[in-house]
Image (cartoon, helix red, strand yellow):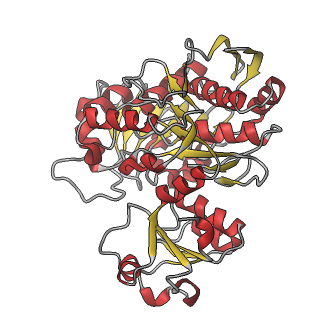
């Protein structure tokens, strides 16, 4: 099957960050693109402006006629859509060609050189950073990103002349097993999505299976120290990386006046005095991975160094919203214990003598149930913690699973840890002596950021 066989594309669940990149991809091909999403958002409204026909009611009668020819229309859906969905049922009953997002990305990686970034955390920043490095070099790339690039204000880059396609390889629902990577990167592999995998061992096995998909003339780049033994095709090269050791690493790391500098070291390459565009410590390691892949794809040291300094980051990933003499306010998408630990430690390394207040919105009942003790341990690294209610996303509540599970385990005294609803958080913050505020979570906590910014940006 080829994507070129279809003249129109319909999305069931068009507004997700990953799906919307595909919406834009097919719009760029000047094809009719339409779809359904549950609720309007800034992203879906922008897609409509760009030409997509999107509606918000699950009703087959609202599907435009151009998408009702099963011979010409490809239907793409997200695994978050339930089997009971009426529009998806309509397409199934009428025998349309229906594919998951990951399957479509798999087709794209068959016809290009896929640069696929996998990992429990770090993959969105690393893939967006890599896309920026290649876009700013003579190499170029097409890129499907898991976040909105602050450099380009989009999650899709298109370069018809480059053979490379950057893709965030998502392990949820084993989606990354659909890909055909030319270069694979694994940034991390701390267990997650145990509602899908069941056990840590099954989760790690999925990453081993992912390594086996790398092209025989390609490369695996894996962060040093992961509990993964790759199973690579004969001929595939393998390199390690980390912040301080491995085939690719950093040395002479310096933090000066809120900026981060380091020297990049790898086989047959060394780049001195690289400035980190988004100056938080975890981005050193993300940067090492992105720079290594850019180098392997042919970007020059001069191009890599210049682009690293101009990288502006990704929306909701270490996003500096206030930065003045009185306050710093950072919003971060971290929602796994390992991510939260790295996020807090990165802020403390950047501002070692300042007080960090964390506002955390847990994401998913199942993840909270599986990791509440780990969440508590990571959050205790902050000076003050405020817990919001769990954001359910695709899940129904689980009896006995609330934010209080985490709260009771945090080894901070009352007054240094608080519970709050989203409607009360601004009034609570206004009573506290805050210095640095770090909001964490993958739910709708970002909707609070304008109010928090207004509170601090005075």
- Toward the viewer: 297 or 201? 297
Is residue 392 visible to us here?
A: yes
Q: Position of residue 246 (x, y in %)?
A: 55, 14
Among the 4 quarters of the image, the one containing residue 52: bottom right
Residue at the far top: name it: 252
Name the quadrant of the C terminus: top right
Q: Which residue is at 29% across, 58% downward?
A: 395
Among the 4 quarters of the image, the one containing residue 336: top left
Q: Is residue 157 left or right of residue 237?
A: right
- Toward the viewer: 156 or 56? 156
Residue at the far left: name it: 399
Q: Position of residue 365 (x, y in %)?
A: 27, 49
- Toward the viewer: 96 or 420? 96
Q: Is residue 418 left or right of residue 456?
A: left
Is residue 325 visible to us here?
A: no
Q: Is residue 396 above or below residue 5?
A: above
Q: Position of residue 146 (x, y in %)?
A: 56, 49
Q: Position of residue 144 (x, y in %)?
A: 61, 51
Q: Is residue 256 left or right of residue 363?
A: right
Q: Is residue 161 left or right of residue 71?
A: right
Q: Is residue 49 above or below residue 100?
A: below
Q: Is residue 36 above or below residue 266?
A: below
Q: Is residue 229 above or below residue 52?
A: above
Tell how many labels. 0
């Amino acid at each position: 099957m080829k994507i070129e066989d279809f003249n129109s594309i319909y999305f069931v669940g068009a507004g997700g960050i990953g799906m919307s990149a595909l919406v834009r991809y097919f719009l760029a091909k000047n094809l009719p693109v339409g779809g359904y999403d549950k609720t309007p958002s800034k992203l879906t409204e922008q897609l409509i402006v760009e030409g997509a026909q999107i509606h918000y009611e699950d009703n087959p009668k609202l599907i435009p006629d151009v998408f009702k020819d099963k011979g010409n229309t490809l239907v793409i859906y997200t695994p978050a859509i339930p089997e009971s969905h009426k529009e998806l049922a309509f397409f199934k009953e009428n025998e349309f060609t229906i594919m998951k997002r990951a399957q479509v990305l798999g087709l794209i990686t068959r016809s290009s050189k896929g640069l696929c970034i996998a990992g429990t955390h770090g993959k969105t920043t690393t893939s967006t950073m890599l896309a920026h490095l290649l876009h700013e070099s003579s190499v170029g790339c097409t890129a499907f990103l898991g976040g909105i690039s602050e450099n380009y204000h989009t999650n899709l880059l298109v370069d018809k002349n480059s053979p490379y396609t950057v893709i965030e390889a998502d392990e949820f629902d084993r989606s990354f097993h659909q890909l055909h990577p030319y270069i694979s990167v694994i940034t991390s592999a701390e267990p997650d999505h145990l509602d899908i995998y069941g056990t840590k061992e099954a989760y790690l096995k999925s990453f081993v299976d992912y390594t086996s998909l790398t092209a025989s003339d390609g490369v695996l780049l894996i962060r040093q120290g992961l509990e993964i033994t790759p199973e690579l095709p004969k001929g595939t090269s393998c390199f390690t990386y980390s912040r301080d050791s491995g085939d690719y690493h950093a040395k002479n790391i310096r933090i000066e006046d809120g900026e981060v500098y380091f020297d990049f070291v790898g086989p047959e390459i060394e780049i001195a005095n690289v400035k980190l565009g988004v100056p938080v410590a975890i981005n050193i390691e993300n940067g090492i991975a992105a720079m290594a892949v850019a180098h392997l794809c042919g970007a020059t040291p001069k191009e890599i160094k210049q682009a690293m300094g101009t990288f502006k980051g990704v929306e909701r990933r270490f996003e500096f919203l206030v930065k003045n003499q009185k306050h710093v306010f950072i919003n971060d998408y971290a929602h796994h214990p390992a991510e939260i630990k790295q996020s807090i430690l990165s802020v403390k390394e950047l501002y070692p003598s300042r007080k960090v207040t964390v506002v955390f919105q847990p994401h998913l009942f199942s993840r909270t149930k599986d990791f509440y003790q780990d969440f508590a341990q990571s959050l205790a690294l902050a000076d003050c913690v405020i817990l919001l209610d769990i954001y359910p996303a695709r899940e129904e509540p689980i009896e006995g699973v609330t934010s209080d599970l985490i709260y009771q385990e945090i080894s901070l005294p009352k007054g240094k840890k608080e519970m709050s609803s989203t409607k009360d958080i601004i009034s609570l913050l206004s009573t506290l002596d805050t210095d640095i505020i770090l909001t964490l979570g993958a739910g709708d906590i970002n909707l609070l950021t304008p109010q928090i910014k207004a509170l601090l940006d005075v």
